[in-house]
Amino acid sequence: MEVIKSIYEMQAFSRGMRSAGETTGFVPTMGYLHEGHMSLAREAKADNAKSVLSIFVNPAQFGPSEDFAAYPRDMAGDLEKCERAFVDVVFVPDAREMYPDGFSTHVDVAGVTDVMEGIRRPGHFRGVATVVLKLFNIVMPNRAYFGQKDYQQTVVIRRMARDLNLDAEVVVMPTVREPDGLAMSSRNAYLSPPERAAAPVICGALLEAKRLYDSGERDAGVLARRAREVMGKEPMVELEYAEVSDAETLAPLREVTAGAVLAVAARIGKTRLIDNILL
Ligand code: PAF
């Protein structure tokens, strides 16, 4: 496994892969890797000649009052996990090289960022889209792998890839969950033991709404209300939203016809968690 820190070296590797006609599978991450990330890394390795995983806590996607400084980091542990998953290259760029003085170009994906996380975290998706485009230009992947847990992020990146004709297939993999259903997330590390014990109610609420959907309910309001009711029974959980949207455009739905997602965001203590389920 190679660890590359400079953009120049990473691009030299990527150019070599492209000119040799070999495919690269890419997993962009902010580190503090868990099984969700590793499932993406394994898929990238299985589908492509080489796999590249980046670790970069991207300052541009955190708001001023968000957890950039506190975001969990464990470079030694991450490199060990990558080694075990047979990742070929770990790319660890430096923030000053990624955002040099005078950096002034951003990617705004309109429409699909005007709902849910886009409203609650102004500037977040601008930061995500900008860094992902930069990483795509550096790593030049044939395929890039993202987890369904960040559903709106996958929609934003797919839309950007389509609109800007990026030469990379965006692959979305299922959310990996703890045995009690909690979606794996680096931010789960913030939860105290009682908060951690309360957190699976988020997944429970999604499953309950899905059960209602499977039994024939198609009213989006009723499905979202059911999820809210389930979460409302856990006093430690403060719900931010539970919304049923079109799976592709993220437009809010009144009735579920085809391709919908129920997405939720909730705070447990100081930790903000998101999750979703496809209907
Ligand atoms: O999902 C994440 O970890 C980040 O948003 C990403 C895609 C690595 C961009 O910084």
Image (cartoon, rainbow, N blue to C red):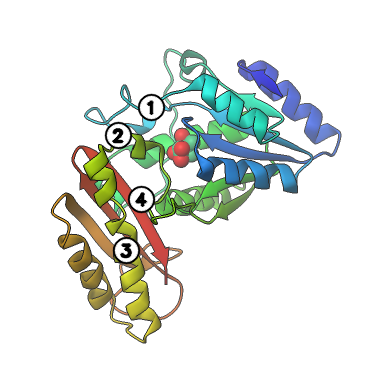
103 shown above or below 276: above
Depth-wise, is mark 3 or mark 4 nearer the camera? 3
Depth-wise, is mark 1 or mark 3 nearer the camera? 3
Crowding around mark 2 (Cα neighbors within 10 Å: few <14, some 14 to 19, many 20+) is some
Query: Could you tell me if the residues under marks 1 and 2 are in contact, i.e. CB atoms within 8 Å?
Result: yes
Measuring from the top left, give residue 43's x and y in whole percent: 66, 47
Judging by the rendered image, the residue that carries numbered circle 4 is 113
Report, in whole angstroms, how far the alpha carbon at label 3 lies from the one at label 4. Answer: 26 Å
Judging by the rendered image, the residue that carries numbered circle 2 is 190
Measuring from the top left, give residue 195's x and y in whole percent: 23, 44
Q: Would residue 176 appear left or right of 232 to someone viewing this image?
A: right
Along the line of sight, which residue is nearer the eye, 24 or 109? 24
* Circle 1 SS class: loop
Amino acid type at image mark 4: Thr
Q: Would residue 127 appear left or right of 52 to someone viewing this image?
A: left
Amino acid type at image mark 2: Tyr
Judging by the rendered image, the residue that carries numbered circle 3 is 204
Report, in whole angstroms, how far the alpha carbon at label 2 lies from the one at label 4. Answer: 26 Å
Earlier-in-chain disc, 1 versus 3: 1
Q: Residue at x 32, y 31 (%)?
A: 62
Q: Residue at x 59, y 31 (%)?
A: 81
* Circle 2 SS class: helix
Crowding around mark 3 (Cα neighbors within 10 Å: few <14, some 14 to 19, many 20+) is some
Report, in whole angstroms, how far the alpha carbon at label 3 lies from the one at label 2. Answer: 20 Å
The reply to whether residue 32 is visible in this rendering is: yes
The reply to whether residue 256 is visible in this rendering is: no
Judging by the rendered image, the residue that carries numbered circle 1 is 72
Measuring from the top left, give residue 143's x and y in whole percent: 67, 46
196 shown above or below 262: above
Depth-wise, is mark 4 or mark 1 nearer the camera? 1
